[in-house]
Amino acid sequence: MSDAVDAIIGQWSEERPDVVEDLWPVQLFGRIQRLARVIDKSAKAAAAAHGVEHGEFDVLTTLQRSGPPYTLTAGAFIKASMVTSGAITNRIDKMEAKGLVERVREGDDRRTIKIRLTEHGHEVTRAAFADHLANYAQLLADVDRDVVDKTAEGLRHVLETLGDTTIK
Amino acid sequence: MSDAVDAIIGQWSEERPDVVEDLWPVQLFGRIQRLARVIDKSAKAAAAAHGVEHGEFDVLTTLQRSGPPYTLTAGAFIKASMVTSGAITNRIDKMEAKGLVERVREGDDRRTIKIRLTEHGHEVTRAAFADHLANYAQLLADVDRDVVDKTAEGLRHVLETLGDTTIK
DNA sequence: TGTTTTTATCTCAACGTTGAGATTATCAAG
DNA sequence: CTTGATAATCTCAACGTTGAGATAAAAACA
């Protein structure tokens, strides 16, 4: 069988046979990018059902899995989410307006602000995360579990090689 | 070894041991999303070196690999790029201003407009695509070719299962 | 033929992100 | 202390995308 990336590489083979040897990374990266789009769209819809944006959902789960007291600095989100400071400020602003999180200044360093999950934020996170996982499972319903595991293992190796070893 | 996704799942195991069983899709999808970000940023930088946006580069290569006469309709880009019509109109507007492509109305159907790669567009595409592939190879320089191939194979299977089998 | 439906593209306001710069606080020397 | 450098967050204009609606042409139907 063949997928969209096979078709793309097939086109290159016709048009630029001289570069075919250099297309092997596309076999991996092309598929990662296409899958990322599909997953993103699906995850976005699942989050929207609970009234939160994709990025906001990311903040919620990051807070939730950090454990008690469900509090992180803005800087922690920047590193965890791979986005810029402006995006985080914007996200927190909107989430604060929705009552999902609250900004608290505590501790000795008064430059840092801490983002704390509210009770309402907890409830939304629980419900949205359950739907999120159900959606993920649904997407992979027809894929062999063994293929999922082995492919994930390969991607882990690539991530490690690229230095993505921390979420702090 | 462990990567960022392992760390995330480790946190969930502590905070929500009840959902650990449902986290296996995260092993795959989480890594796809993180890798997509890394690849995107790198590819964006490579394209920017040639004065084109990421999405514009996508249009250029789609045209190039389509072969002579290097002409496609706007609708073809919408399907190939997985973006909305507004995004394509915007891209073509800017690329036309840069002299990379030109809109031509030819054929019997006067609703469709065709986007044609200009000579300048050809040159930019050639140079940018060479850098793009070099950048891809660089990212995977320290990864076993066998791992790349096997992982790509697994992703192909997932894409097929999700129905992503066409680029038209 | 005239009418409706469908198709292809464009318009445009709203949205989230970027990225550079500003602000404010802490740390390190002297 | 004071000065300079570093760090954390916020500000804001610019940017690309979305998504609903508009426009216009073609196809389907009556």
Image (tube, coloured by chain):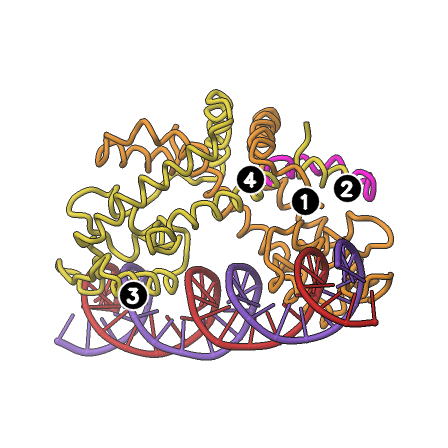
Chain colours: A orange, B yellow, C purple, D red
The amino acid type, in three-letter code, at marker 4 is Ile
Chain to which the residue tagged by mark 3 belongs: B
Q: What residue is shown at x 67% (from left), y 44% (from top)? A: A133
Whether callout 4 and callout 3 share a subunit is answered yes
Marks 1/4: CA–CA distance: 16 Å
- Quadrant of the rendered image containing residue C23: bottom right
Label whose residue precedes the other's in the sequence (4 or 3): 4
In the image, which residues are magenta? B11-29
Label whose residue precedes the other's in the sequence (2 or 4): 2
Horizontal and vertical percent position of residue B13: 79, 38
Q: Nearer the viewer, residue B68 or D26?
A: B68
Chain to which the residue tagged by mark 2 belongs: B
Q: Do the residues labelled 2 and 1 touch (CB within 8 Å)?
A: no
The amino acid type, in three-letter code, at marker 3 is Asp
Q: What residue is shown at x 60% (from left), y 32% (from top)? A: A160
Q: Residue B32 carries which label?
A: 4
Q: In which quarter of the image is the C terminus of chain B?
A: top left
Marks 2/3: CA–CA distance: 46 Å
Q: In which quarter of the image is the N terminus of chain B?
A: top right
Q: Residue A133 carries which label?
A: 1
